[in-house]
Image (tube, rainbow, N blue to C red):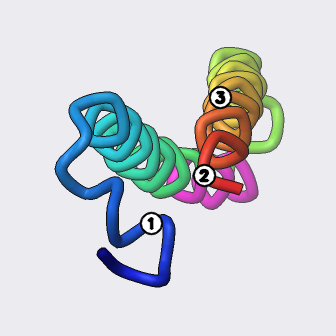
Amino acid sequence: MSMNFLDDTNDWPEYQIIKNDIHRLEKEHLEFSKELQEAESTLRVDIVNAELKAKVNQLKKKLKKIEKRLNESLNLFR
């Protein structure tokens, strides 16, 4: 038996589900962050584009939601 609690949980299905969820959320976060960065860069060139502004705002909301879910999942490990 290990002295570290997390070492003993690697084979628990519940923790594997949480780890998979965290991995998926991190991947989504990275993808949306890249998309937001590109949209913001384009918006700097075309400031009056209302559609692009809406896209940037939508991406920011999605990222905020993902960050909240990611923090909730990570708190299960703390």
Question: What label does residue 77 carry, if any?
Answer: 2
Q: What amino acid is at disc 3?
A: Arg
Q: Residues within 10 Å of mark 2 (few under 14, many from 20)?
A: few
Residue closer to the observer: 24 or 61? 24
Q: Pointer 1: what residue?
A: 6
Give the position of the C terminus as an image quadrant: bottom right
Rendered location of residue 72, percent (x, y):
71, 33
Residue 65: horizontal and vertical position, in percent? Answer: 71, 24
The range drawn in magenta is: 37-45
Mark nearer the viewer, 3 or 1: 1
Q: Nearer the viewer, mark 2 or mark 3?
A: 2
Q: Where residue 22 is drawn, which disc sits there?
A: none
Does the magenta-highlighted stretch encompass residue 24? no
Give me the C-alpha separation between circle 3 and circle 1. Answer: 21 Å
Is disc 1 surrounded by few (<14), some (14 to 19) or many (20+) residues within 10 Å? few
- Which amino acid, mark 2? Phe
First in residue order: circle 2 vs circle 3: 3
Query: Does the magenta portion include 40?
Result: yes
Main SS of the magenta part reads: helix
Q: Residue at x 64, y 24 (%)?
A: 62
Q: Residue at x 32, y 39 (%)?
A: 24
